[in-house]
Image: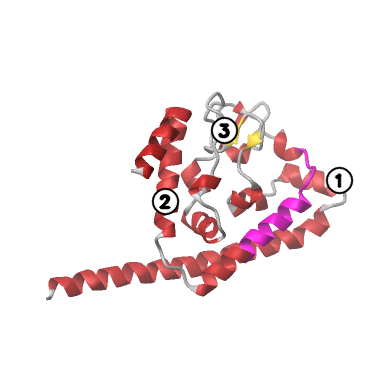
Amino acid sequence: MFVAVERLLVKLRNPASRADELIALGDRVRAELGRVPVDEERELASELRARKLEVAAALEGVSSCGSCATGFPKPMGCHDGGACCGGVTAHVFDDDELAGLVLGGTRARDLTPPPRTDEHAGCAFRAAEGCTLAVAHRPARCVHFACDGLRRELHARGRLDALEPKLDALRAVMRRFAEVHRARTDRDVLASIADAVAGTQR
């Protein structure tokens, strides 16, 4: 009942295309919450969140990410924010990224969309004035994607050398998390198949 009401509210408060993506993402969050991770997944998700916040703090005050999409055709150039924010929501929040967020504490209520008046232009959380998500609830890729323009700005400010190790550490944790998460989901699938086969033999 609650999920049905939630979906109705999403449809009323958002353009149809954004509503569809938000509903699909919410369903995936709930599905992920129903799974049982291994301890290493939990530990890595916690570290992933900490590393992501560390990188975001090191990027404080940069201007490149708010202007690089200027002059691009839609959807890239529709709003402020980077061109990388123009991606499809399901691709930005792929299975590994979503699992990392959920195990790191993100819930459906944390995924706040833009106002209805803001055109749906790329990711469902891309608003006219930037991303509507707190950094803790953004996929790791949204934080560690350092394009050439951003790197030039950081280099000019003398901040790139200090940032590189933080970016490397975040990427390394994300890679390891993806490995552990995929191995666990593969085991879950094999266990489900084995149970189904055993059921047909009874």
Per the rendered image, the range of residues in magenta is: 47-63
Please name the residue that numbered disc 1 is placed on.
156
Q: Quadrant of the C terminus?
A: bottom left
* Residue in the picture at 55% in, 23% down: 117
Instruction: Looking at the picture, tell me which residue is in the foreground, 131 or 167.
Output: 131
Q: Real-space Cα distance between discs 2 and 1? A: 41 Å
Q: Earlier in the sequence, mark 2 or mark 1?
A: 2
Q: Which residue is mark 2?
A: 28
Residue 197 vs 1, above or below: the answer is: below
- Tell me if 117 is positioned left or right of 63 in this view: left
Give the distance between the C-alpha atoms of the residues marked 2 and 3, in whole angstroms.
20 Å
176 vs 192, left or right, is: right
Nearest to the eye among marks 2 and 1: give it: 2
Find residue 63 and name its label.
Answer: none
Q: Answer with left or right where residue 125 lies relative to residue 168.
A: left
Q: Quadrant of the N terminus?
A: top left
Helix, strand or loop at disc 2? helix
Residue 173 image position (x, y, % from top left) = 62, 65
- Residue closest to the eye, 7 or 162: 7
Q: The disc labelled 2 sits on which kind of residue?
A: Arg
Q: Which residue is labeled 3 in the image?
A: 114
Mark with earlier residue (1, 3): 3
Q: Is residue 192 above or below residue 102?
A: below
Magenta highlight: main SS? helix
At horizontal 65% and vertical 49% (from top left) the residue drawn is 135
